[in-house]
Amino acid sequence: MKTFMASVVLIFYFSSCKKEENQTNKVEYDPSKPVVIDRYSPESGRVATQMLIYGSNFGSDRSKISVTIKDKNAAVINVSEDGTIIYCIVPTLRGSEIAEDGEQVTGSVKVKIGDKEVTAGKEFSYTFSQNVSTFLGFTDQDGNSSIIDGDFEKAQFERPFWITFDRNEGSGKPRNIFVLEEDRGLRFINMKTKTVETLFRVGDNLWRPRTIAFTLDYDTMIIANDAGNWTDIGTIILLRQPDGSFPVNTWTTVMNHKQCNGGAIHPITNEYWFNSYDKSQVYKVKSRATIPWVYGNATGNNTNGSEGTNYVFLVQDNGWEFNIQIAPSGKFAYIVSRNKHYLARMDYNFATNYFDKPQPYVGSINKPGFLDGVGTNTLFNTPQQGAFDDEDNFYVTDAGNHCIRKVTPTGQVSTFAGRPGAAGYSDGAPRDAQFSYPLGIAYDNINQTFYVGDRDNHRIRAIVIQ
């Protein structure tokens, strides 16, 4: 309330000055006099808090004024014509350190004009908070977008669907991002050069790429493809080049398979697990030493391009659209069923190197809706991709509800970001922000940032502690 009232006062003050500018003389900064800070308001807040600094001898030229809070530059928006009030915006005070939502720090408020710098008598109390922002992408006035490569400022997306990271390049450094666009192709977001590149567009019997997985050395990218026949492309790979890049418009088919909705690499054993929509089959790849890959179950292998009868288990019944997402520990995985609106859980047996048959965990089978709570008493509407944090919490896109849900290891479901049932586009605090059919999500635990593929807004959104 203090911030709002202060802003109203300042807006009124500036507008009054504007109306009377013919009757008012602007005051210049006087280097022979001290710069004085009497007070500032508010004395506490978060990133993007509007701050008013009261004092004297600020001058009326905004370009000559510098404001820092905890040595971070604040955006100076305006200054009163009599040089007594500065209007600025609190920057993020987070550096490379790990910060928790709600954690507080304090920092000095300083004003510098010319060669004179003055520090306020009281430090600003800053609270770290999670915020949703737009990372990449934009639309025209009609909400339309195209597939456009180039610098971050120019790049556009269509229907971002699945998101994953390249190898970790070291503590505090950005991780490159790969994005599948639904029925469009594969995009590469280079965080070093801040550019976006299309690696391939759909075509050549590769029409519905669904998921991306990396082998543990990050040298092989594995993409599952949802095709209509057993002889169609089921899985392709892209091999990292000597310079570290992945090829453009070049891939290798390693399995022919029907309706492969998804696949995942086990983070401990490096095994590739994948599934089929046809009868809700789950398979394990037993050898990647040859092409085609050898896949099947504990007792038998399948013939490439023929009906895969040697499955490990069936999740439920025919026509189950789902993907497998394995926890970083490798101890368990979730089956995320997009068209049946629930998540199942399956534990991994390290003695046999096989997953046990999954059991319904959260959400209610064939009951789309929205309800937070515990276990199968909760409701989802078209869940798609999830991301694990360091404590095995699972943040899953709930596309039909236009939000992100959080699933704890004990089965507690809550709403993490977005306004359930209210599609739209707005940044801000997680529960105030709006998404429109979000489908993809990935979590960078080093930089504490979630990236969200906001499909119908044609954007990549970020949820970050600032």
Image (cartoon, rainbow, N blue to C red):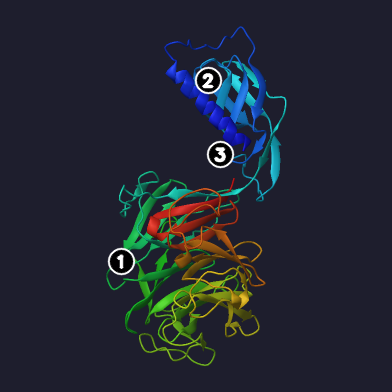
In the foreground, 309 or 135: 135
Residue position for label 2: 80
Few, some or many residues within 10 Å of mark 3 (<14, 14–19, 20+): some
Residue 442 seen by the camera:
yes
Residue position for label 3: 48
Count of numbered circles on the image: 3
Q: Tell me: 345 left or right of 125.
A: left
Instruction: Tell me: residue 401, above or below residue 315.
Output: above
- The spot of residue 30 in percent (x, y) is 57, 9
- What residue is drawn where x is 66% and y is 48%? 99
Quadrant assignment, res 199: bottom left
CA gap, disc 1 and disc 3 = 41 Å
In the foreground, 342 or 159: 342
- What residue is drawn where x is 57% and y is 62%? 415
Placement of the C terminus among the 4 image quadrants: top right
In the foreground, 175 or 286: 175
Few, some or many residues within 10 Å of mark 2 (<14, 14–19, 20+): many
Q: Amino acid at mark 3?
A: Ala
State which tag comes first along the sequence, 1 or 3.
Answer: 3
Q: Amino acid at mark 2?
A: Ser
- Give me the disc on residue 202: 1
Q: Tell me: 332 left or right of 455.
A: right
